Every structure is written in C-alpha cells, then in structure tokens.
Image (spheres, rainbow, N blue to C red):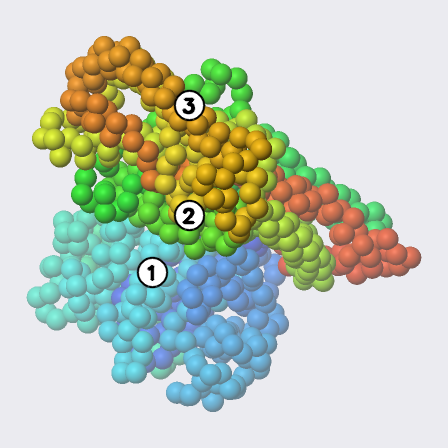
C-alpha cells in the first residue's frame, strides 16, 4: 500500500483533528488506560464466515490467520498509528483479563509482550497464530509458543497442554505503526456461532455471545458485518447489536460478499443499502473483498482495492444506486474515521471525569492498605499488641462504641436465669388421687415474682400477693397455659410423704430428718450445673469470636508469616486456660449450693410462712369440697376467695390458725396422730408418782402405814382436778353457746358446709399432712433463697473469671508468647513482621495504577485539540 493510495484517517477532511484525537486514545491505551476508563473504540462483529476477517485485513492492511470454519478464536485488538519517517513495525502482546476455568474477570489485568518487535510484515501472520495458541492453552507457559513451529499445529493440544480451549475471552493485542498505516483502533471479535462441531462444548455458543456483548457496550462503535449470502433477519449478530443499541445510533452496517448473489436478489439488498429496510442511524456500507481464488493469488492491498472499485463500477445495480458514496472500503474508512473522531470528541468530558474518579478510587484503596512497616520491628510489634489488648479491654468493659460483645452475652445470662427459674420444686398440697377426685382444685398458683427481697413490710406485702398467685396446675394444664413442655414434674403431697418416710432412721416422732429436706433441695438443683455450663459455653463462643475478629484485624496482614498463626495459638492457649479455671469455679459454686446454708433468715422465714399459708389454704379447699359433697350443700367455687368471719383465725375459735412450731405441732392444740410414727400407748398417759420400788407387790389392803398412802393422795388430787375442769368446761359451754351459734351462722352464710358443732369440729380438724406441708414450704422457701443467689453469682463469676480475666492477661501473655520480653526481641519481631507478599503486590499494583491514572488524567487535562 503506497502512501499516495493509502486510505484512512490521514486522507479525510478532518485529518488534523482526527489524527490528534486518535493519537490521544492510542497513547491512553499504551499506558493501560482501558483498564480504568471506557475508551472509545470500534468493535467488529459478525456471524461465523460473514467475511469479517477480510474486512479486518482491508482496514488494517495486514494478513490475519485463516482456517476452515472459525478464523478468530479469541479477540484481537488492533491499535494502528501512522508514524511518518519511521519504518513499519508491530509488537504483539497478550492481555489476560479472565480466568478461563471460571470465566470470571481477574482483579489484576496483565498485558505482556509476546516475542520481540516485528519489522517484516510477512512474519506477522505466523506470530498471530502462535499468540492465539498461547491464549488457547493457558496452562502452558506463554513463552514456549514464541518460537513454536506452526506447521505442527494439529488436532492435539501442543506442548503437552492437557486441553486446548475452543474459545477464550483473553485478548491478542497488536500495536502497529508505520508511514502507510491508518490511525485507527478496533477490536476483531470471534464470529458468532449457532452450532459447534462434534466433540466441542456447546457452552462455547454462550461464551462467544457473552464475549461479544461485553465488548459492544459503552463507548463503542459497532461495525456489524452482514453477509449477503444469508437473509439479514437470520444473522444473530444483528440481533445482539440491536440489544445494546436499540435505536441504531452506534451501529454501522457493512454488507459483504455481494458477488455471491444470484440474479434477482440484488433489489432486496439495495433496499437495505439505501435505508428502506432495517434502517440504521449511520446507514450501511458495501465492500467486496478477495474471494478464495483471489486469496490464493496473494493479491496486494492496492490490487484488492482496485478490483473492488472495478466491481462496483461495472455492476449495474450498484453503479446506478443512489448510495454510491457507501460502496467500497475507502468510503467505509472515511466515514469510520469521521465517526470515531466524533465519538472521541463527544466522550472526552466523560473520560476526564472517569479519570478523576479512578484516581480517587485508587487513592482510597491505597489508604485502606496497611502502611509500610517501620525500621524498628520490636517497637512496631509491641505497638500492635498494645492496640489489640486495649481494644479487647474496651469490648469487655462494654464501652458504648464497643458494646457488641456484652450485648451478645446478655441473652445467655437471661436464658440461664429462665432455666434456673424453671427448676423450682413444683409441690402440690394434695394427693394425685385427690386431684383427680376433686378436679376443681386445679386453681392458679403462680411462682413468686422476681425482684422480691427481704426488705421492709411494704415489700413483704407485694411478695405475699405474688405467692397468692402460685400455680398448682398439673403438667398438661401448665403446658397449655405457659406454652412450655419442659416444666418440672409436679410432686404431690403423698409422694413427698413417701420420700420423707424413706429417709427415716432413728428420729423421734414429730421430727423430719434433715436429710429428707436436703435430698428434696438437691433434687431441685440437679439441672443447675448443666444450665450454668451451657451459659458459659455461649459466652465462651462469643468471646472467642470477638478475639478472632480482633486478631484478624490487627495481625491479619501477616498471614503469610508465622505471626498470625502464633498470635492465634497464644490466644487459644489463653482461652483454654481461662476456660478451665471458669469451669472449675462454676462446679465449685454448684458444690456449695448442694449443702443448704443461708444467713438470710428473714427472707427464708418470710417465704416459708407464705408458702405454708398457701399450701394450707389449698388443703382447706379440699376439706371444704369434700364436706360439701358429703352434705349436698353448695360450696364456694374454687379459685374465689370467701369472706372469713371475724374470729375464724383466732386461737380461741381455730386453734390451728397460729404458725406451726418446728416440730409441726400446733401450739396449744389438741394432740394429733404423729405423721411418721405412732407412739405406744404407754407414751400417751401420765405415769403416777410412787415410792414403791418397781417389781414389788403393794402392801396388803387393810395394812396400815405410818404415813398417808401417796398413791391414794395422787388419785384424790386427780379426781378433784378433773371435777374442777368439768365444772369450768360446763361454764364455758354455757357462755360460748350463743357465740358458737353465731359463728356457725356466719360460716354457713359465707358458703361453708357448717350446720352444727360437729361440722365445725370437722372444719377445723387437724390435717394428717401438716408436717409434710411444712417440709414442702421449707424446701420451696430455701430454693427461692438459693435461686436468688445463684442467678447472680454464676454470671458474675463467668464475667470476672473469663471475660474480664482474658482482657487482663492478654497483653502480658502475648508479649511473652511473641518473645518480646527476651534478648532476641528485635530479631524475632523482624521475622514475624515479614509482610505478606500479596499485600506488597497489591500496594505496588495500586501505586502503579495511581501513577497510570495520574498520567491519563494529566494527558486528558492538557489535551486542547
């Protein structure tokens, strides 16, 4: 191609302006700006065998590799620069943008020279073949293909490659310059395919489509190659172009192979060329490139253009067309230069803006990387350890901006509280048989509210109200009420009695063994240790997670050295040490709770009296229901409190109303049958005093003694006392008869089944389970004391021994574990602080990018053309 006949941007009316614009874009591509900004370009697309390669040769003046089927198996970017006074030269490079296995774009895009500079155009075709082989065999070192014998190319992968790709997204780049070269930049994309050969991957169809779609976005003029051998509607390249450019403002149609039309087919394509069918904003052009026979003749570029011109001038249909200015490669080149320069000019402001943003982005990313290390490694490592320990202490102290750790711990402590609360002894002051016989006894009897303490009387009144709401429902009713299925199994009064009886040894009557109470208390605390350990497990995981995050934050940049692993190991040993100590402390606390003890006598006594009162009240309801059923009298519905007549709780009218003694005997009340043992009859009568030795017969009757008979005197005294008591009882009965009748009337009016003194006596009769109720009340009250104690001491112990303890030990243990306290601290620190090569590489890459973008920004800012 001679200088005089060369067609290109240098021959257009806008030569100077266009040359300056394309020179700018070429310079920007030369410094790698395409990785940072969307540079204007031309993309050549078309269906397989649409004449696209011939068009590329016509535009660039080079010879591209040809083979049967698909010619281009990877993108080829041509960057053409006219250089007056310099010989023709070309440098081939490989740009690796994607991972061929995953198809994902690489974070770092590399462009590497492939071979040496080419100064003989006849050698370029084979170099392009080798470069494409290198792209299609990514597992083989690219350098091995530089001198590869292209005559050995066959069906098998070359140079031991395990598999040769059919297509690739990675790019072969040509930087071509010379006095006869047109200033232009375009990228030739693989032809779009609809089918694959036998044995090839059908996924290649989508691979090529996606590759084309990526390249024709943005600041791209789409050079759409359409073969005239096929209907325009059947060519999928046109469909893809319309997807990204629905209005056709960026698409330039190029009709190829007009010499293959049959007679009569010209009119249809003439309508396309002249814009009557499938119109585009920039219209269509028609070129005629050498056919197969002409290619074998090795025509020069000049001869090919001459034959093209002769064809259009001698073919009547095209010669008589109104669009003769759109026939031939020279006309296409002129308009491409005009359109490309216009696109560049139009996008310059946006390129400047994109370059500015890219600079800011590079600087922001660079600022996020750790700064280069100082020259004093031990001081640097000590600073890192101190910062780590300080931040961890801030988290354990729960400062406002470091509250996340404590917030994660709080739900675990609350769950522990609830689990302990659920272990409360569920005593029922009636037998299971009585409950089934009297179902109305299942009244609500809720647990005492939390927060009660052994304070003053007003607080006691609030506690008493909560005890009045204790829930004595059975398991099924409780689960329906609370929604929980893990409620503690109830223990009925007869079951408690059997448990007490199983604990008896040498106790006197009316004495309950302490071991029985202790056993019931321990039963209620069986789940405390598992609950405490489960709580600690959650806390341990939260703290370990926080420590992992902090270790990664402060030492993660040294993942490639031994520092990160060493810190992890030291922290893990510290966690395990504190974990063992905390578990031992929890188990020690649980052992303490297994031995009942408290000095909080007021709280224990208060709750004992309240529970006992409630249990007695439930027993009284049972007696009321039973008596009512026997007499057929109406009764007050269970769960509703009945007004109690005045005097009902007085010791005179109800001798059982006063608090029980420790032995379980009502003070001043009549003797009752003992709960656990029946005394012998000799223990129930007084023994008269006598001076007669035991075992000797009394003196004969009638024998007179020198002094009065003591036995007769004692019996006489007893008779006199009995007569006095009988007289007093008759007097009291006479005086009490009106009061008794009044009391019976009041009780009957209140709904109690009392009609006479016998009913009244039965109403206030002694309860055979009284001593059991006392045991139940004492055990339940002590559980309340211990529960209030343990729900605080266990979280406090975990927090102090583990959470806070870790923070206190962290810095000293890390300094010792990292060797900062030894003589070789500086040497050891230097080995630890060997920086991660990836971080170094990333920093270098960002610095290079920043330098590149600064260069691009400077060039765009200074461009005044």
Image position of 401 (left or right of 723) = right
| Label 2–label 1 contact, CB within 8 A | no
- In the displayed structure, 753 sits above or below 2; it is above
Tag in front: 2 or 1: 2
Disc 2 and disc 1: Cα gap in Å? 105 Å
> Which mark is first along the chain, 1 or 2?
1
**Disc count in the image?**
3
Q: Nearer the viewer, residue 849 or 54?
A: 849
Q: Nearer the viewer, residue 188 or 339?
A: 188
Q: Residue at x 19, y 48 (%)?
A: 279
Mark 3 Cα shell of 10 Å, populated few (<14), some (14-19), many (≥20): few
Q: Residue at x 55, y 43 (%)?
A: 692
Q: Residue at x 42, y 88 (%)?
A: 156
| Label 1–label 3 contact, CB within 8 A | no
Q: Residue at x 66, y 45 (%)?
A: 801
Image position of 825 (left or right of 737) = right
Residue 581 position within the rendered picture, expressed as x and y whole percent measured from the top left: 67, 52
Q: Nearer the viewer, residue 271 or 848?
A: 848
Residue 210 - label: 1
Is residue 608 something one can see in this rendering? no
| Label 2–label 3 contact, CB within 8 A | no
> Which mark is first along the chain, 3 or 1?
1
Residue 680 - label: 2
- The residue that label 3 is drawn on is 721
Mark 1 Cα shell of 10 Å, populated few (<14), some (14-19), many (≥20): some
Residue 175 position within the rendered picture, expressed as x and y whole percent measured from the top left: 53, 62
Residue 730 - label: none
Residue 727 position within the rendered picture, expressed as x and y whole percent measured from the top left: 33, 17
Tag in front: 1 or 3: 3
């Amino acid at each position: 191609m001679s200088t005089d006949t060369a067609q290109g941007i240098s021959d257009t009316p806008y030569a100077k302006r266009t040359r300056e614009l394309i020179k700018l874009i070429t310079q920007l591509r030369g410094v790698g700006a395409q990785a940072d900004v969307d540079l204007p370009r031309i993309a050549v697309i078309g269906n397989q065998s649409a004449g696209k390669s011939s068009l590329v040769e016509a535009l660039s003046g080079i010879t591209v590799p040809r083979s049967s089927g698909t010619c281009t198996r990877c993108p080829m970017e041509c960057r053409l620069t006219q250089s007056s006074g310099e010989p023709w030269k070309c440098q081939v490079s490989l740009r690796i943008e994607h991972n061929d296995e995953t198809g994902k774009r690489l974070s770092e895009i590399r462009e590497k020279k492939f071979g040496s500079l080419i100064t003989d155009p006849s050698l370029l075709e084979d170099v392009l073949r080798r470069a494409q082989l290198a792209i299609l065999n990514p597992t083989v070192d690219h350098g091995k293909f530089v001198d590869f014998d292209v005559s050995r190319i066959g069906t098998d992968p070359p140079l031991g490659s395990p598999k040769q790709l059919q297509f690739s997204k990675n790019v072969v780049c040509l930087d071509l310059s010379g006095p006869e070269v047109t200033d232009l930049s375009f990228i030739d994309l693989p032809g779009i395919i609809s089918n694959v050969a036998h044995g090839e991957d059908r996924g290649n169809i989508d691979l090529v489509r996606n590759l084309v779609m990526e390249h024709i976005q943005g600041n791209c003029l789409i050079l759409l190659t359409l073969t005239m051998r096929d209907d325009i509607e059947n060519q999928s390249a046109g469909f893809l172009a319309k997807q990204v450019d629905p209005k056709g403002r960026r698409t330039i149609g190029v009709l190829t192979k007009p010499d293959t039309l049959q007679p009569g087919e010209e009119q249809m394509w003439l309508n396309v060329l002249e814009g009557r069918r499938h119109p585009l904003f920039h219209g269509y052009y028609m070129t005629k490139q050498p056919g197969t026979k002409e290619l074998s003749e090795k025509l020069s570029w000049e001869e090919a253009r001459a034959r093209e011109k002769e064809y259009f001038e001698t073919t009547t249909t095209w010669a008589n067309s109104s669009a003769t200015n759109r026939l031939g490669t020279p006309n296409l080149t002129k308009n491409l230069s005009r359109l490309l320069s216009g696109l560049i000019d139009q996008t310059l402001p946006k390129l400047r803006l994109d370059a500015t943003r890219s600079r800011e982005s590079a600087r922001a990313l660079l600022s996020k990387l750790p700064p280069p290390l100082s020259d004093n490694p031990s001081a640097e490592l000590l600073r890192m350890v101190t910062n780590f320990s300080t931040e961890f202490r801030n988290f354990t102290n729960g400062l406002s901006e470091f509250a996340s750790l404590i917030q994660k711990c709080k739900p675990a402590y609350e769950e522990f509280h609830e689990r302990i609360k659920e272990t409360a002894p569920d005593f029922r002051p009636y037998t299971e048989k009585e409950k089934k016989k009297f179902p109305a006894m299942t009244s609500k009897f809720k647990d005492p509210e939390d927060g009660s303490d052994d304070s003053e009387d007003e607080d006691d009144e609030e506690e008493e109200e909560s005890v009045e709401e204790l829930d004595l429902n059975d398991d099924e009713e409780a689960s329906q009420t609370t929604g929980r299925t893990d409620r503690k199994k109830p223990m009925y009064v007869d079951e408690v009695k059997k448990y007490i009886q199983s604990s008896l040894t040498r106790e006197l009557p009316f004495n309950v063994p302490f071991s029985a109470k202790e056993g019931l208390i321990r039963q209620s605390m069986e789940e405390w240790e598992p609950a405490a350990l489960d709580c600690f497990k959650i806390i341990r995981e939260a703290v370990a997670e926080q420590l992992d995050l902090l270790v990664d934050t402060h030492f993660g940049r040294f993942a490639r050295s031994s520092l990160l692993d060493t810190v992890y190991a030291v922290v893990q040993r510290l966690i395990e040490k504190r974990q063992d100590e905390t578990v031992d402390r929890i188990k020690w606390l649980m052992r303490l709770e297994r031995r009942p003890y408290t000095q909080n006598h007021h709280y224990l006594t208060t709750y004992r009296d309240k529970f006992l009162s409630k249990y007695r009240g439930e027993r009284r309801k049972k007696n009321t229901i039973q008596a009512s059923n026997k007499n057929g009298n109406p009764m007050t519905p269970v769960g509703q409190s009945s007004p109690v007549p005045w005097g009902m709780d007085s010791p005179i009218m109800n001798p059982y109303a006063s608090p029980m003694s420790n032995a379980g005997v009502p003070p001043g009340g009549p003797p009752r049958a003992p709960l656990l043992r029946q005394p012998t009859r000799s223990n129930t009568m007084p023994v008269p005093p006598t001076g007669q030795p035991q075992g000797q017969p009394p003196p004969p009757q009638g024998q007179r003694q020198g002094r009065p008979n003591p036995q007769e005197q004692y019996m006489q005294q007893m008779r006199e006392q009995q007569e006095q008591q009988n007289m007093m009882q008759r007097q009291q009965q006479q005086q009490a008869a009106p009061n008794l009748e009044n009391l019976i009337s009041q009780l009957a009016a209140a709904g109690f089944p009392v009609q006479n003194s016998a009913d009244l006596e039965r109403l206030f009769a002694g309860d055979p389970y009284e001593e059991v109720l006392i045991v139940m009340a004492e055990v339940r009250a002590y559980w309340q004391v211990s529960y209030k104690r343990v729900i605080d001491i266990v979280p406090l112990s975990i927090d102090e021994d583990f959470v806070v303890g870790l923070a206190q030990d962290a810095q000293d243990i890390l300094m010792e574990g990292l060797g900062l306290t030894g003589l070789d601290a500086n040497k050891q620190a230097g080995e630890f602080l060997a920086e991660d090569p990836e971080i170094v590489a990333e920093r270098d890459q960002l610095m290079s990018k920043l330098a590149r973008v600064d260069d691009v920004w400077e060039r765009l800012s200074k461009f005044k053309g």
